[in-house]
Image: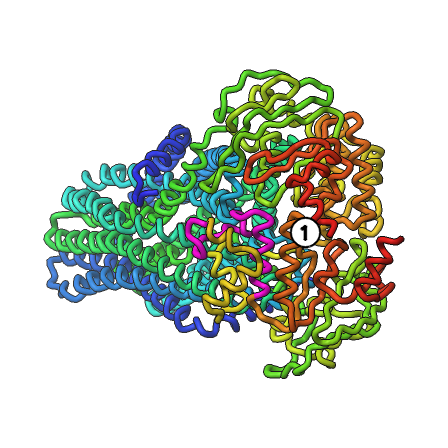
Amino acid sequence: MRRGDPSAGEWLRRQARPLRAPLARSGLLTALQALALVAQAWLLSAILTAALFAHAPLARLWPQWLALLVLAPLRLLLGVGARRTAFRAAQRLGASLRARVLRGAQALGPYGLRAQASGDLITRLVDGIDAVLAYFARYLPQAASAALIPPLLAMFVFPADWLSGLILLLTAPLIPLFMMLVGKAAAQASERRYGQLRRLGAAFIEALGGLVTLRQIGAAGDFAERLDAEGEAYRVLTMQVLRVAFLSALVLEFFATVSIAVVAVLIGFRLLWGELTLRAGLFVLLLAPEFYLPLRALGGLRHTRMDALAAAQELQGLDAVAPEAAAAPRAVHAPHEAAPQIRFERVGYEHGGRAAALSECSFAVPARAVTALVGASGAGKSTLLSVLLGFAAPYTGHVWIDGLELSELDVAQWRALVAWVPQQAHVFEGSVRDNLLLAAPGADAGALRRAAERSGLAAVLERLPHGWQTPLGERGLGLSGGELQRLALARALLREQARVWLLDEPTAHLDSAGAQAVGAVIRAAAETRTVVLVAHRLSAVRAADRVVVLGGGRVIEQGPPLELARARGVYAELLQAEQS
Amino acid sequence: MRPALAPVLSRLWALMRPYRPWMAGGAALALLAALAAIGLMAVSGWFIAVMALAGASGAAINYFTPAAAIRAFAILRSGARYGERVVTHEATLRGLAGLRAWLFRRLIPLAPARLSALRSGELFARLRADIDALEHFYLAVWVPASVALLSVATALVLTAFTLPAAVLPLLLGTLLAAVVLPLWIERRAARDSRQTVLDAAALRGLLLDALRGHSELLAWGGVPAHNSRVESLAARLDIHRTRLDQLQAVGGGLAGLSAQLSLLAVLVAGLAAVHSGALTPPELVMLALLTLALFEAIAPLAEALAQWRATTLAGERVFDLADTPPVFIEPALGTPLPPRCDIEFENAHLRYAPHLPWALAGVDLVLAAGARVAVVGASGAGKSSLLAALLKFYPLQQGRVLFGGESVAGLPGDPLRRRIAVIAQQTTLFDLSLRDNLLLAAPEASAGQIERAVSLAQLDAFVASLPQGYDTVLGEGGARVSGGEARRIVIARALLQDAPVLVLDEPTEGLDARTARDLYTALDAAGRGRTLLLITHRLSGLERLVDEVVVMDAGRIRARAPVGEYLAGERGG
């Protein structure tokens, strides 16, 4: 992505559009608060002048005192109201943006997501949104104040003392001008910092996830040093940005402060020459700092805008990803509710640069039978399952489900008929029970128990400290590979309405007794379902009705296992390799 | 147990030792800027009042000194503000980087035994967000509090000399704005403040699930439900944040209110003094503007204290994690490893938690140097636990593991593990180039050694297919390579480690039969002259690699036999 991409600013402005009305309301309250401030300054200068020069006794000034006392809480209320109005609106906007960006990330699909570092995505989703939120909630209202308050105050300064008013008006535009000049350089540096921040986040999450591996190979110390270097690079970059950002604040600060000083000195001399009343002079001197205050505060929030712009550049990519529907306009057919016959016709699929994952694959998967996909790793077995799950899309050729083209089926209805046992199941935060219910949210205790018993998960549950309620950590820490596999199988069993089972190495981590038991479950399932089984091991395949041998994304052989074993082809060779 | 607050602060202070000059410098510049701002307003007020009086009476006056003072204060304030910003941020960034490095190094010895209960999303949140949050102690509390304290002291001294009657009201007003109000805000904000930290961490975890588990959510139709969990948590977080912001707005407003009330009090006292002749009118104008400027320096404290609880929570969590004792105390640096590398388990008992069954229930096993042994058994029989005990990852509850005749508990962990190359069931690849991934295990390996390891692991063809060869970046967790390729990379990495002991934990899982056979052949060659321990539940091809088979069941050794005899028995039975 180009640095200083103008579209990021455009995107950010577009996002902020719904804020106009609440910002206007908040601006109105801010303006009222500024009026109260003017009244206070006026009263204060009146009291001081009257008491000091006219020697008026305090008692005679009671209306002014009283007004001052009333104005103080009024300013408080107006200020709180203005901030609250703006913050709530920004918060709502941020929430809808967060939801949209999450959907955008999900719309990348399983293949797109796998290519992204998830630590990096999380940083974008959490920190990126927070950066944009800070821009909405702090910067924009402050920008509104900066646009409103100085002209408003100038309107009162001018009648009191035109010369001071002129100084204020002349110096005020210089401030945004210098801010812009300095800000250009700072914006670029800020983008770099944001990129570095994301890399840092990804490196940390990765180092933690792989800490055991790092210790095992004795590389933890080296890796810590690598993180140190990343952290140091982050510090250097950040300081670069900040020094420039602070420079713009310095310019602002300098103009504001020196202008106040000039106003004060000039007022002093004109008082000396009798050209001005003390009351007007005091009034202007009290207002002068308030004139610059909103501009100074805006300068202090400068990095908020830069961070938001840098985050916007990352976020708009995700925001632009249209939801799933846009991937392919599909005429919607409802799939049949019986075990379907599946036919692949010259199916091809490519992803991410590397060699074609599938090409010209043609074979049939009969209903109520077990079809095994075998072949070397990288042959395209899992990709075929991804095609059936609707993850690998768009593909070329046709996948016929009982004569209906898969891409024209309603994908949600189709997936509702599918149960999938992935190679390595993801374990979600939550209890064992929660993890199972993912496959069938409405399942009752009886269904859960049956699924657990048939998958062999019941034996695992007995060992867990809180049975069904045992919380599972990320990647199922505390569960072994075999236990994970039983969990994934239990999920599949729990989805009783599934008519298609897609199993990716369901017995990989199981011993022979366990594998046999799972084999029996699969055979039983195949009585009413269409089962596609991916296997490296031919022992898991012997019970299959059909075998499809894949190599380099193509179908090499297919047929009943016994026939293939006799046929002296690739399958027979693999079989021999395994038995020897 | 929750550590008390004082220890959090004092330990943080101790850790910040190298950065204290930066921290103090930043605070000093902040104070300078604040005093210059107060001086600017006070002198300006006094100056115009004097000028007005002189104008009215026609008296002569030296206006050069105050006018120059006003300009000097203006320049000083701008410069000091810039310096303050640069130095405090430098201090913060250095301090945070130091903390991060310190915590990461404290975590290393905790893996895996003490960290397995934590999710990496949670850990990540702790390591990064919690540490980042700690800057608040310095930037938003420590610096403004010291500035407030010293500014107030200066202002009170000035007032005591000019208008003693105003000292008490000013003291009360500043106490209200700088002490009472911040403490009240801290109490009111406590719950929301804490909850923002907890919810933000939970949100990260949920998002991690949403992205890493996306395929499964999609397949099971769970995406909408999960997204609505994310959204309702985010909504809760937003509510807490909104309440906090509101409280901060109220805090800021009340600070302004106390400024205005103090001003009124100063005026009342001052006007009486002017009338009695104890105070000149310009002095009163000076005190009035001084009061207003003083409260500008105090005002940020009230808002800042709304975050106090969140910050202490972050600090508690960081120290909680860092204080987790590792399961082994490392022996003194430089403790030598024995020259031999035979391995012996003596009545080894291991379980991962008191409520879990014994993973090792009295294992006696001797592996002479150069022995080639397979450990077979059902899943959960305790095979991998042998490895965990040998690597000093988990302590034995009873019995010993000996390496070269000495108990591993007394041996230094890292050198020991460098002698034992492991091809584990769950191994992580990093988002580095293929070369760097391999070099992690042996930073000094030459290009030739790398190529030999790669070809032994049957990776030649894979490397040749990569667009950038060894420089291809593998993606997070090796996301850009297939399962089989990842496994072979791990194997190459282990071979590169060139250790006298090679442990293979299900090395052919995820590989097809032919690749597995070729790999056994390669491992056979690579394993020559090394002790080789193969952990597997697959019997095919065992005889290629090992001489003996040990059968495990329920944490115990059931049988040990030469491989031929064992396999014949299995086939016969």
Residue lying farthest to the right in this orientation: B573
Question: Residue B159 sits in which quadrant?
Answer: bottom left
Q: B498 and B362: which one is in front?
A: B498
The residue depicted at 50 percent of the width and 38 percent of the height is A112
Q: Is residue B485 magenta?
A: yes
Task: Return the x and y of residue A78 as percentages of the image width and height.
Answer: 42, 38
Q: Is residue B499 left or right of residue B369?
A: left
Q: Which residues are magenta?
A: B466-495
Residue type at mark 1? Glu
Task: Return the x and y of residue B490 as percentages of the image width and height.
Answer: 58, 58
Task: Return the x and y of residue A237 as percentages of the image width and height.
Answer: 35, 58
Q: Which residue is mark 1?
A: B509
Q: Is residue B410 visible?
A: yes
Task: Return the x and y of residue A337 as percentages of the image width and height.
Answer: 71, 19
Quadrant of the frame with the N terminus of chain A:
top left
Q: Is residue A65 visible?
A: no
How packed is label 1: few (under 14 Cα within 10 Å), some, or many (20 or more)?
Answer: many
Question: Residue B291 sits in which quadrant?
Answer: bottom left
Q: A362 and A261: which one is in front?
A: A362
**Image height of B245 relative to A559, above or below:** below
Q: Is residue A425 left or right of residue A345?
A: right
Q: Is residue A433 left or right of residue A406?
A: right
Q: How many numbered circles are shown? A: 1
Q: A36 and B542: which one is in front?
A: B542
